[in-house]
Image (tube, rainbow, N blue to C red):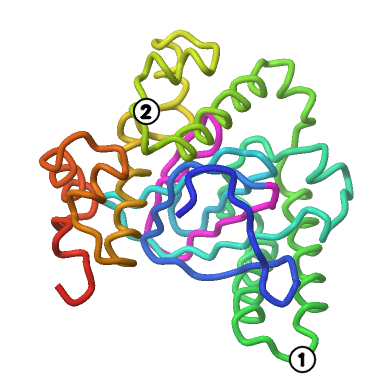
Amino acid sequence: MNAFLETRNYHSGFPVSSFSATDNHFLAHWHIDVEMVFVCKGSIRIGVNRESRILHQGEMAVFGSTDIHYYDSKDLNSTVIILIFRPELVGSPGGWPENHRFEPAFMDLKRLDLPIRRSITGIFYSIANETNHHPPYYQLYVSGKIMELCALLQRSFPTCNHDSRKKTGKMPDVQKIHYAIQFLQDNYMNEISLEDISARSNLSPYYFSRLFARFTGMNFKEYLNRIRIEKAENLIKANRKSIIDISFECGFNSVRTFNRTYKAIKGIPPTKARPGD
């Protein structure tokens, strides 16, 4: 889990990753890669920039470079296919993804004609199968399928120019939330108040709170606690430091608060998280 600018490393040097995920949950983050998600079964809550929506079977979403996005499976069950690739893989035909974004990012494939819907769905499954099993020339095959997928989506759904987003004032807000998320990731071990982070973002505490929740799907304190608990979980599993030391190392000022927060987020007390305990 990376709750900030995620830098992806692709195995074998081929800049494509595709996999199936069940009940996916991932804190708000962004990256330079293009990301697409297709809901195979069930429902999942997805947020991108200022919008969030519960997507159901047969729906999908596309995240462009620097889009803040998150997955939330609380009280929901789903199986999704996630496809992530470097923008250079498809160049910039029709201005996408370099200069255009899908607007909105959420897409209901069920409204498309059946042949097109089947083609898009089949491509997701085909790419996931190829990247999982690596048959001969799979890289060439996958590259072609991604190009086909991008063409079908651009034919079927509207896009907008990046400049139009800037004129609405959305881009400055995105950049401020980028900064806030990165700052929390880098300084989670320190005491951080709402007043501190809002001042650093050049926003009032009230406006920052509303904006942060809009982009991340949770309030500032909950987001910070989730970062701290993820860090604590990694430390608990990786070494034999005491729970007390780990709690303070991860920014909690009392063990009682740490234990309560850990159990609320992970469902178990921290003492049960260590392998062999």
Q: Which residue occupies 44% across, 35% down?
A: 187
Secondary element at image label 2: helix
Q: Is residue 23 above or below residue 223?
A: below
Q: Which residue is mark 2?
A: 220
Q: Quadrant of residue 173?
A: top right
Instruction: Verify whether residue 34 appears in magenta.
Output: yes
Q: Is residue 6 left or right of residue 70?
A: right
Mark 1, mark 2: which one is toward the viewer? 2
Q: Which residue occupies 69% across, 43% down?
A: 65
Q: Which residue occupies 30% across, 38% down?
A: 251
Q: Residues within 10 Å of mark 2 (few under 14, many from 20)?
A: many
Q: Which residue is mark 1?
A: 136
The amino acid sitting under disc 1 is Pro
Please state the extent of the stretch shown in magenta in the rendering: 32-54
Q: In which quadrant of the rendered image does the N terminus lie?
A: bottom left
Q: Nearer the viewer, residue 187 or 213?
A: 187
Q: Is residue 52 above or below residue 17?
A: above
The tally of labels here is: 2
The picture places residue 224, in percent across and down from the top left corner, at 36, 36
Q: Residues within 10 Å of mark 1 (few under 14, many from 20)?
A: few
The amino acid sitting under disc 2 is Phe
